[in-house]
Image (cartoon, rainbow, N blue to C red):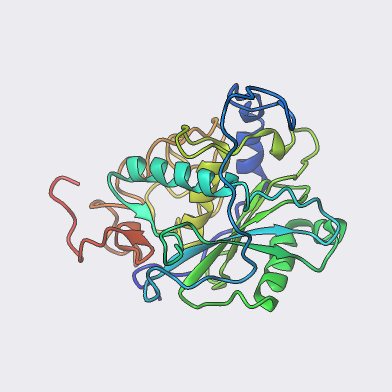
């Protein structure tokens, strides 16, 4: 089912995330290396938000939407990324990127009734090493505990910022057809032979999107059921990706991934030229806004 988007997706295994991580994202000059009390003391402190441990009442309760979770393993350090606004800022930067890259659509994130991004804190019951011991199935282990904690709204996808290690990738999503609702970014993942995933900074709200912001959008699109095998530029060597253009949000291949566009040819998974035999077209997803009925704009 699709609504018009299915809540299914494809694993983003290590190569895409590693390639982007290894591309120098950790050397971004905007990274703030000053510790507490360091840097420009004349600047105001970042906003602080009340910590929430449950999904708050929704601004749009009847809509399909993406709920954000900040999850820390039992033995992990709580860096308060929900409280200090870093995750909220990164999501804002990610959605600003998606709005431009898609030509006017944005991902509908779960907002509280006062219009703020709803970010839930979850202290997971497992140890970081216990999750990492699952190899390529860390996401499944994290998902099991997220669902057990009560995050199982059928109208929601859960984007989890996991403040721990994976060991093989910086982010992944469930395989197509599983219906799994959880995608995950592994903020402290260390993949042998590559810079730590955490060397990539989270962008602030008014900063250009970078690695984590692209990856958040990429994983959510996977969770909506893309890229399907019907895409003309489907990469059979990297399932659920396209392989023709490294500027495509859903690209995976030998070139460095630097996304600027959602389906630049509008022929694989989003837009007017998607093959008629493809069941899904991201343009019509119930998780995107604004909704334009079922009519593509002229010359889209």
Q: Quadrant of the N terminus?
A: bottom left
Q: Position of residue 183 (x, y in %)?
A: 59, 60
In the displayed structure, would residue 134 be above or below residue 96?
below
Q: Residue at x 46, y 32 (%)?
A: 208
Q: Position of residue 157 (x, y in %)?
A: 51, 66
Q: Nearer the viewer, residue 221 or 39?
A: 39
Number of labels in the image equals 0
Residue 269 visible in the current orientation: no
In the displayed structure, would residue 219 be above or below residue 201?
below
Judge left or right: residue 87 versus residue 299.
right
Judge left or right: residue 264 versus residue 217.
left
In the displayed structure, would residue 160 be above or below residue 8?
above
Q: Position of residue 131 (x, y in %)?
A: 80, 61
Q: Position of residue 138 (x, y in %)?
A: 74, 60
Residue 135 visible in the current orientation: yes
Q: Quadrant of residue 253?
A: top right
Q: Residue at x 70, y 39 (%)?
A: 197
Q: Quadrant of residue 179?
A: bottom right
């Amino acid at each position: 089912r699709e609504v018009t988007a299915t809540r299914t997706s494809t694993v983003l295994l290590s190569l895409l995330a590693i390639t982007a991580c290894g591309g120098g994202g950790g050397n971004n000059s905007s990274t703030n290396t000053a510790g507490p009390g360091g840097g420009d003391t004349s600047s105001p402190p970042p906003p602080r938000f009340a910590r929430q441990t449950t999904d708050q009442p929704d601004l749009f309760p009847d809509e399909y939407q993406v709920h954000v979770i900040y999850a820390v393993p039992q033995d992990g350090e709580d860096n308060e990324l929900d409280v200090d606004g870093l995750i909220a800022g990164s999501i804002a930067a990610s959605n600003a990127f998606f709005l431009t890259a898609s030509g006017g659509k944005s991902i509908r994130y779960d907002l509280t009734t006062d219009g703020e991004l709803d970010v839930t804190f979850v202290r997971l019951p497992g140890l970081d090493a216990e999750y990492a011991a699952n190899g390529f199935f860390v996401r499944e282990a994290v998902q099991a505990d997220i669902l057990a904690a009560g995050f199982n709204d059928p109208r929601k996808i859960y984007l989890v910022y996991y403040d721990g290690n994976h060991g093989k990738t910086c982010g992944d999503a469930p395989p197509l057809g599983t219906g799994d609702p959880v995608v995950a970014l592994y903020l402290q993942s260390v993949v042998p032979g590559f810079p730590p995933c955490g060397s990539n900074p989270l962008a602030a709200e008014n900063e250009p999107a970078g690695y984590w912001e692209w990856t958040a959008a990429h994983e959510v699109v996977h969770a909506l059921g893309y890229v399907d095998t019907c895409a003309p530029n489907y990469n059979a060597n990297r399932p659920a990706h396209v392989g023709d253009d490294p500027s495509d949000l859903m690209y995976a291949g030998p070139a460095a991934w630097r996304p600027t566009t959602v389906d630049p040819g509008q022929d694989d998974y989003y837009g007017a030229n998607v093959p008629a035999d493809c069941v899904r077209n991201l343009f019509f997803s119930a998780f995107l806004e604004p909704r334009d009925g079922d009519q593509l704009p002229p010359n889209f």
